[in-house]
Image: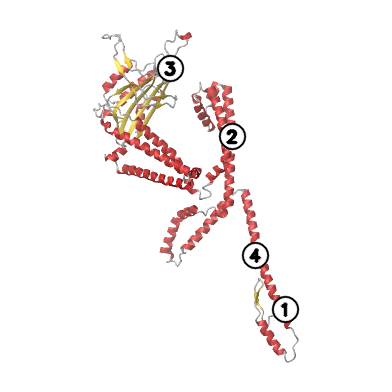
Amino acid sequence: MKRGIEDTFTVNEFDYNIDFARMTTKAQTMDWFENVLIPNLLPQTDYNGNALSLKEQGFVAVTNKRLGTARLRAVKVQADSCDVPAALQGTITECYANLKSSTESKADFKGNYTVDTGPAVRRGTFLWDVPYAESNDGWYSPATKMSYGGGGQTINFDNSYSNVTEVWQKVKDFNFLDDTTRAVFFQANFYNANVDLVGAVKFSIEFVASGAVITSSQIKCLPLIRPVRILLGDGASSYDALVFFSELAFYGMVLMYGLDEFRIMKGMGRKAYLKNFWCCLDSLSLFLFVVVMILRFLSLTFIGSVYDDFQKEDTFLDLDWVVYFAGQVDNVNSFNAVLTFLKLFKFVRENARMSQLIDTIKVASIDMLSILVIIVIVASGYGIAFHIAFGHAVDEYRDFTESLFTLFLATLGDFDMDELRSYNQVLGAFLFVSFIVLMFFIIVSMFLAIVDSAYEAVREEIALSHGDHVNTDPLTLDLIRLISAPKVISDSIYYVFVGDKGGNIAPSEAEIEKRRALEAKKAAEEEAKKQLSPEALERQAKLKVEHDFKKLYDEAMERVKKLTDTQEVLQNVLNQISNNMIVPEEGEKGEKEDEKEEFYGELPEIDDGEGKEKRGSGGGE
């Protein structure tokens, strides 16, 4: 819809290589109104030249129905609103100042004129009056930084081609757009039933005091009446109804979470709550959702109040407020989308690697703050310098904010060095080159070095604190299970339907889980080794050597202890042998041999660490 309206009114050329965006004079503005705007706003023939019916004349670009009347509004300044220097008063008789609240004209337009031929027209009689009217159609120009109020001399264009051409002839004859005019606004509204969108169109033409003509267009196509159609049961699709009621359910969840967040703040205490970054982020996000709810309610209320006026052909539909509210809803939601996705880091911080962004910012925050102060000081100085040197000649440096933005683009490679040198070859080159060298090659490099150093410190801390368990947090394990779920399912199906037939025994679930954990551990170890710095690898190797040495030492001490116990047993045996070695009589020798054999047969087993040997009869010495 937007493309169709835009091509119809702003892309069509009314002179060679001249369209709406390329207009530079007031004469071209008049030609655009007469040759492009009015014929396309009220078409009389189709593409074959056939006359259109009265109903078909109400459509622009075939499918866009014109809603109500169109409006032309002129904002003017008072005559002689500035003083001419005394030396030039003989040649300059009139002076019209810039538009301000003190110089704006709020009088009605009174048109009178005489003609050279035809019936005489009595001078002093106002032949055409255009009243001054206030409205809510204020506008801020991003090109000239001018703010225009909603007031102005207003003309309504009805749906009759003959009436509109007659009014436009009066605009030209009575010089309605005279030298006091500072801006002209043309507004119209359309509805496309094919896509269920309302289009609010505003063409702005500024006649600045310096003599330039600056054009801009705003074409906003929004589903303004879709919620009203859903609530009234006016033929809305089931999908649109589902989206709308899902939005209402979401707002209910926002209120529920808001109450829960208030309960958390009450339990933690206000000071402790405000010191928690994630709590503040949650509160800000919920607050912005509440703002969106209010804006949506105001938008629905306003569009509901003018919904019945869509059928009126003789009334101008002032949709500026509802379009403004809809635009603000999109703006707030776009900013809140960033906050909402930042909240994901609150949950993924359980994984050490996923927390690197927040941890890096935390480590580098103090140094980054000092660098940011330096950047602000340098950028402010150069911004003022460029504005003073080139602000009156180069549009990109016309004020301080535009100068800062242009310098920022220059650091990204978007700059026009030739334009600066064409105005001042020495100063332009000096300021630009010195800014790029100081800002980009020095300060930005310092900033990146701080971030890189903080990132390396965070990685080393993760490697030392987690070691082999860097990927064993619950979040990572759940993710591994999720990724490996298809393989587990396919393996299970294979073992159920194929494994038993081939004589294979399917492993138990515990064995599969154990095997998967070992594979994950090995993969994590390999990944950790790849990501560690040389210093961290050396430190980890030292720790491993110390661990292996301690293990070897413990094993050696255990063996020494066993040998000591064995030595004590042997000493006891030797003592007993020594006590029993008495030379027996001839008759007692047989008894002693039997006792000796019985004694040695009861000796215990001795473990010397290399094997067990049972010392007994026939084996003792």
Instruction: Tell me the amino acid under the disc marked 2.
Output: Ile
Instruction: Tell me the amino acid under the disc marked 3.
Output: Ala
Q: CA distance from mark 1 to mark 4?
A: 31 Å
Mark 1, residue position: 575
Q: CA distance from mark 4 to mark 3?
A: 98 Å
User: Is any part of residue 3 visible from this angle?
Assistant: no
Instruction: Tell me the amino acid under the disc marked 1.
Output: Asn
Residue 588 in the image, given as x and y percentages of width and height: 72, 90
Numbered disc 1: secondary structure: helix
Q: CA distance from mark 1 to mark 2?
A: 87 Å
Using residue 283 as the reference point, say whether residue 120 is left or right of it. left
Using residue 356 as the reference point, say whether residue 40 is left or right of it. left
**Which label belongs to residue 443?**
2
Residue 57 in the image, given as x and y percentages of width and height: 26, 28
Using residue 324 as the reference point, say whether residue 394 is left or right of it. right
Tell which of 169 and 142 is nearer to you: 142
Numbered disc 2: secondary structure: helix
Tell which of 539 and 306 is nearer to you: 306
Mark 3, residue position: 97
Q: Earlier in the sequence, mark 1 or mark 2?
A: 2
Q: CA distance from mark 1 to mark 3?
A: 127 Å
Residue 233 in the image, given as x and y percentages of width and height: 27, 41
Mark 4, residue position: 555
Numbered disc 4: secondary structure: helix
Q: Earlier in the sequence, mark 1 or mark 4?
A: 4
